[in-house]
Amino acid sequence: MSTITLVGTRLAEAGREFVYQGEASACEGCPYRDQCLNLTEGVKYRVTDVRDGAQTLPCGVHDDGVTAVEVEPASVRANVAARNAYAGSKAKLEGACPHTGCPSHEFCEPAGAEFDEEYRISEVVGDPPHDYCMLDRDLTLVEFAPSDE
């Protein structure tokens, strides 16, 4: 389901994805707070449409201002334990990984997913991008279904 919100004009492009970080200190006292702060903190969103004719409004956070867009929760690609990685099943992230240079790091610690949460797997993508896990984890790359909010 789409939600209308305000995002920085640089983010206002169909297909652009972002993780909503919540209220910034510069939001205090802003007359557009109710239109901007209507998403769920920590959830990954995809811009589905930029509203035609929407004006650019001044913003204390975005130097080029904000504009109206439609967004919906987006899926998150992640590495999970291979033993129970099936479409339709639920999984958790395996935990933090200090190996930031690993080609799989962005999937072991994906933006928009938390370590202590369980997510429904919508698709099994396959092998992760690394050749060898330095933490000796047996991982599979999956797509977590978008948040129901």
Image (tube, helix red, strand yellow):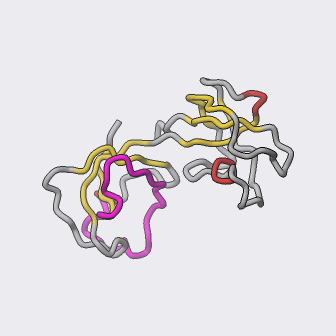
Give the camera-side residue of 57 and 99.
Answer: 99
Vertical relation: 82 (above or below) 12: above
Q: Quadrant of residue 23?
A: bottom left
The residue drawn where x is 61% and y is 36% is 119
The residue drawn where x is 20% and y is 65% is 56
The residue drawn where x is 65% and y is 25% is 89
| 97 drawn magenta | no
Asked whether, in this view, residue 121 is left or right of residue 135, the answer is left
Asked whether, in this view, residue 48 is left or right of residue 73, the answer is left
- Which residues are drawn in magenta? 9-34
Q: Residue furthest left?
A: 53
Coordinates of residue 128 in the picture (x, y in percent): 69, 40
| 17 drawn magenta | yes
Coordinates of residue 8 in the picture (x, y in percent): 33, 64
The residue drawn where x is 63% and y is 35% is 142
Coordinates of residue 45 in the picture (x, y in percent): 43, 48
Q: Residue furthest front?
A: 131
Asked whether, in this view, residue 32 is left or right of residue 129, the answer is left
Quarter that holds the N terminus: top left
